């Protein structure tokens, strides 16, 4: 039934109901709602870290992912959109079609 691509600019923001810790290039996130643990790969971690509600996914892909991995914008955007959907489905990211106020700092797990 047509294209699954997100229409227009999408502004992702991190949920405040999580705890997170970065280990090497991966982010470990636990949901405060249901105690589910998620491990994000390097690309998903880049999207998650940049998701402050004020930067669009297009900008994150162009300025972070394409530069770091030297991939074509269209391919990277398609992969990032899928990642975004999954993170939003689990409540890790919130999505808006317009910029949001920056999210509050998340609870960082101490060693």
Image (cartoon, helix red, strand yellow):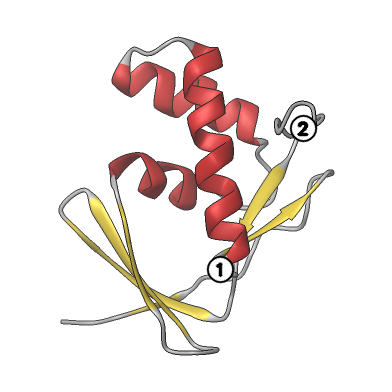
Q: Which residue is mark 1?
A: 90
Give the class, few, some or many, for how many residues have Cα within 10 Å of label 2's Cα (few <14, many ≥20).
Answer: some
Q: What residue is shown at x 81% (from left), y 29% (from top)?
A: 8
Q: What residue is shown at x 15% (from left), y 53% (from top)?
A: 24
Q: What residue is shown at x 51% (from left), y 35% (from top)?
A: 80
Q: What residue is shown at x 30% (from left), y 20% (from top)?
A: 69
Rendering coords of residue 64 (x, y %): 43, 28
Rendering coords of residue 17 (x, y %): 56, 81
Left or right of 90? Residue 2 is: right
Give the class, few, some or many, for how many residues have Cα within 10 Å of label 1's Cα (few <14, many ≥20).
Answer: few
Comparing 69 with 52, the one in front is 69
Kindly report which numbered mark, 1 or 2, lies closer to the viewer in this rendering: 1
Q: Is residue 34 above or below residue 60?
A: below
Q: Which residue is mark 2?
A: 9
Label 2: which secondary element: loop
Left or right of 11? Residue 45 is: left
Rendering coords of residue 63 (x, y %): 49, 23
Quadrant the N terminus occupies: top right
Comparing 54 with 10, the one in front is 10
Whether residue 14 is visible = no
Q: Is residue 21 above or below residue 41?
A: below
Rendering coords of residue 42 (x, y %): 29, 43
Labels in figure, total:
2
């Amino acid at each position: 039934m047509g294209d699954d691509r997100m229409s227009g600019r999408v502004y992702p923001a991190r949920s405040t109901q999580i705890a997170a810790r970065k280990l090497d290039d991966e982010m470990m996130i636990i949901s405060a709602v249901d105690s589910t643990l998620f491990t994000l790969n390097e690309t998903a971690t880049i999207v998650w870290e940049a998701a402050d509600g004020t930067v669009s996914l297009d900008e994150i892909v162009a300025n972070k992912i394409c530069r770091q991995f030297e991939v074509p914008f269209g391919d990277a955007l398609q992969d990032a959109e899928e990642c975004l959907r999954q993170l939003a489905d689990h409540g890790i990211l919130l999505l808006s079609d317009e910029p949001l106020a920056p999210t509050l700092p998340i609870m960082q797990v101490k060693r």
